[in-house]
Image (cartoon, rainbow, N blue to C red):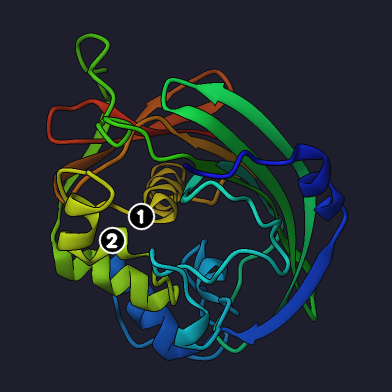
Amino acid sequence: MTEKPDLDHLRQWIGRSTEATDIVTAQLVKGLRATLFLTVGEPKTGDAAPFTVHWCLAPTVVPASELGPDGHPARGGFLPPVPLPRRMWAGGELEFFDTLRVGDEVTRTSRIKDVNLKSGSTGQLCFVAVDHELTTPRGIAIRERHDIVYRDVTPGSSAPAKPAGPPPTAKHRETHFADPVLLFRYSALTFNGHRIHYDRDYVTKVEGYPGLIFHGPMQAALQIEFAAKLRGLVPKKFSYRGVQPLFEGNFSVNANETAAGLETWTANSEGQPTMKGTATW
């Protein structure tokens, strides 16, 4: 049985901070452009990087001996040691102030904003909110809130949510195919060892999902790039939340106009939303 989270203990991590620095390289930009279905080209110093290139910068690196069974670094350290075994990227919000460019030295300052427990249909949930600020020598480039959710292992908890009605109609849509190579590439670019994205035996036999899982941040990245293409510039603010897992196979990136900007979403092969976003300018 999983240990019950001690909220008072976990909330002692609120306010903890860490800092890391990395450089946006031309090779990284090429790889991310290729993975996000953008024109690859030959990026040079000063060229704009994809808008979420910061998710590839200064990833946590630990020896293999310090990884948990799911491929993530073992609990503790900067993030609180939540005892629930399943960790997922739940959502967040980004504010864009400046475009990151090839050659930029980027510093990320991160701080634990909040830790909360909730009960859901899959059992106990623990939400950890982390604030990030990305800066270059020019000043602030991105402010971000990242929401992480931890949950217990319960029978059937890994099953995707059932459709709640007919799929939404999109005015703007792009369709793509997510194969294991695409998912592996994004894992490699972000140094993400989470086995649900590339180890089919693990994700189906241990976590109980029907197939490899599409990365939450890649879904958000594709929505941001789509919104920027439709409007001709990156949103000032983009908020997003996952609503159900997206698995390997056919998927789409969608958008509709709103009074404030665009509502965006990624959808599975049945057209059901898997992550919803809101872009404003």
Q: Indicate the position of residue 276 as horizontal and vertical percent values.
A: 43, 31
The amino acid at mark 1 is His
CA neighbours of label 1 inside 10 A, class few (<14), some (14 to 19), many (20+) = many
**Along the line of sight, which residue is nearer the eye, 29 or 121?**
121
Read off the residue under disc 1: 215
Q: Quadrant of residue 251?
A: top left
Q: Quadrant of residue 21?
A: bottom right
Residue under the point 34% across and 79% down: 31
Q: Is residue 280 visible?
A: no
Residue under the point 54% across and 51% down: 234
Q: Is residue 22 left or right of residue 279?
A: right
User: Does the residue at mark 2 contact the one at mark 1 (Cβ under 8 Å)?
Assistant: yes
Read off the residue under disc 2: 197
Q: Is residue 149 left or right of residue 270?
A: right
Secondary structure beneath label 1? loop
| Extreme residue toward the front, this view | 1
| Extreme residue toward the top, this view | 165
**Along the line of sight, which residue is nearer the eye, 229 or 167?**
167
Q: Which mark is residue 7?
A: none
Q: Is residue 146 visible?
A: yes
Secondary structure beneath label 2? helix
Establish if 239 lies above or below 35. Answer: above
The amino acid at mark 2 is His
Distance between the alpha carbons at the discs numbered 2 and 1: 7 Å
Q: Is residue 134 left or right of residue 27?
A: right
